Amino acid sequence: MNHLIIEVDNLKKDFYVGDVTVRALKGVNIQIRKGEFVAIMGASGSGKSTMLNILGCLDKPTSGSYKLDGISISELNKNELAELRNHKLGFVFQSYNLLSRTSALENVELPLFYNSSVNSRERKERAIAALEAVGLADRMHHMPNQLSGGQQQRVAIARSLVNDPVVILADEATGNLDTRTSFEILELFQRLNTDEGKTIVFVTHEPDIARLTSRNIIFRDGLVIKELLVNEKVLASDLLKSLPIGDHEN
Amino acid sequence: MNYINLIKIAKNALMRNKFRAFLTMLGIIIGVASVIAMLAIGQGSKKSIQDQMSSMGSNLIFIMPGSQQRGGVMMGNSGSQTLKMADVEAIRQQCSDIIAVSPEVRSSGQAVFGNLNWPTSLYGGNTLYLGIKKFEVESGRLFTDREIASLAKVCLIGKTVVENIFPKGADPIGQTIRFKEIPMKIIGVLSEKGQNSFGQDQDDILIAPYTTVQRRFLAIDFITGIYTSAISEDKTEEAITQLTNVMRKQHKISKPTDDDFRVMSQSELVKTFTSISDILTTLLGAIAGIALLVGGIGIMNIMYVSVTERTREIGLRMSIGGKGRDILMQFLIESTMLSVSGGVIGILLGYLVSAIIGSLMGWPVVIMTQSVVLSFLVCSAIGIFFGWYPAKKAASLNPIDALRYE
């Protein structure tokens, strides 16, 4: 369990807006090991989203190194980055980003369409397995507009699982959901983390969510200002029980 | 990335929004169909003019009386009495490029049989007249030289006249009708010719020996026209020259401006009408071109808009591992599928519309392969290009920007 999945060393990222240089990241060091459930926290403008984009191989650092599962991404070109995303990463977005008018099953299958080593039968089997893992096997033929927000996010989580990534990157994944549904999603993430050993990086600005993870990395002004281990592990399922009854969906 | 997967992705994307796909195709369908149908109508009218002209005999040359001077006073063309039987005789003897010549005299009046009557025209000619004007005897017989000489009261009858004055199923041959109060025995029925290019019914006719028409009906000694056949269509020019020379000699005319007759050929008329219908075709082609342009702009718009509104989808696909070229190929396949199927439907619709117009309006339609190929290629090219171009822009976006696109 000591295998390093994410290794960020003195990473800097500058943006150029006209003549002005914005230093979004000013030398960040992060290490995330296999099986960790890490929350990246910070106010808006703290650089946490920029960090997530770089971690997700959607953007490249200006300087410094980033190794994902031992692969240094600064030497890769656009197509190789795309392949890396396809094989090693799973994304969960705040706004779900499901394809409309497309069944849950097909949405989950999508990443595998871009992997030519997976045939159509295997693609379907893996998508069904991923939907089972998020508890939506009975909804696989539903369209996104026939699903609640929480269910849509579960489909998105299934999509992030289907390629068996080394890390799942969640960007404010509960930002559009009510408290109860948020805890339900977190319960799912916790289960994936503890039962299946999935490594998860969860970007959030809500402390309530952050305390459900195992470690918090706090950003401010482009730097990691604090890292703290969550000693007392809180279970989302316990929090759910404490919520008043009657406002749940489904 | 394998292409089977890309084709599946593209197909799924199209099926996801059938209405949008249909709207995109509609531009192509209308563009292609309208070009095909319009050019088919233009081409059809041209062909029908040519067909009808040649059915009248493409080697036909005819002489009409021209204006005439009497003591310095110009007389009009109508009522000219310049053409005589002597001219016909001279042409028969002297023009080597003319194989047949016949006088023509014409009288209009009411044909009566029993209690039915019908206004028609009686044409007089010699025994070659039918051959020159491409009439055929369907049943019965033609009049003879002897009947011409004896001013016999016999005639051939056209289908329209038969239908209007004879009861259904009756055989007109051997019956006697009256035309301008003079009884005429019907000796033959003409085969149907239909309308000529002026919309004139060529079956509304009676044909009799010219002598009969000249003397018995009109009491004149001149003729109203001379109809001739050149040896072949190629010899028309030479034949016209010969005819003109013979006529000038007959009428003792030295200057061409003094001509009291006009020589006209069918092929000249054909040329005139063909050039008119060429203008028509060009006009329709221009309208069709505008339709194609408008269709093309429609395709551009909907393609551009649909790719732009799918920027987030593009961002998502890239974030889960789609490469720029996968995205581009997907959109290229989509727009090709749309354009090609739209083009094919457009071609079918073009044929259908042409056929419907053809049968409803009674217009002839000729579908030109060039118009089919051209409109299909133009529309497909526009469709594919405007599917590809915005997709290329989107595929070169940073995945994050594409994902955040509103």
Image (cartoon, rainbow, N blue to C red):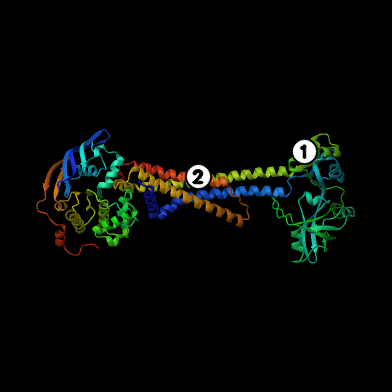
Q: Which residue is mark 1?
A: B238
> Which residue is at the front of the view, B99 or A126?
A126
| The furthest residue to the top | A19
x, y (%) of residue B324? Answer: 34, 43
Q: Mark 2 falls on what kind of element?
A: helix
- Asked if the residue at tag 1 contacts the one at tag 2, i.e. Cβ–Cβ closer than 8 Å, the answer is no
| The furthest residue to the left | A231
- At x 33% / y 50%, what residue is drawn? A113
Can the viewer see residue B302?
no
Give the number of the disc on residue B34. Answer: none
Q: Mark 1 falls on what kind of element?
A: helix
Q: Quadrant of residue B19?
A: bottom left
Q: CA distance from mark 2 to mark 1?
A: 47 Å
x, y (%) of residue B351? Answer: 56, 53
For label 1, count other residues whose C-alpha is less than 10 Å away and answer few (under 14), some (14-19) or many (20+).
some
Mark 1 belongs to which amino acid? Answer: Glu
Q: Which residue is mark 2?
A: B377
- At x 30% / y 57%, what residue is drawn? A125
For label 2, count other residues whose C-alpha is less than 10 Å away and answer few (under 14), some (14-19) or many (20+).
some
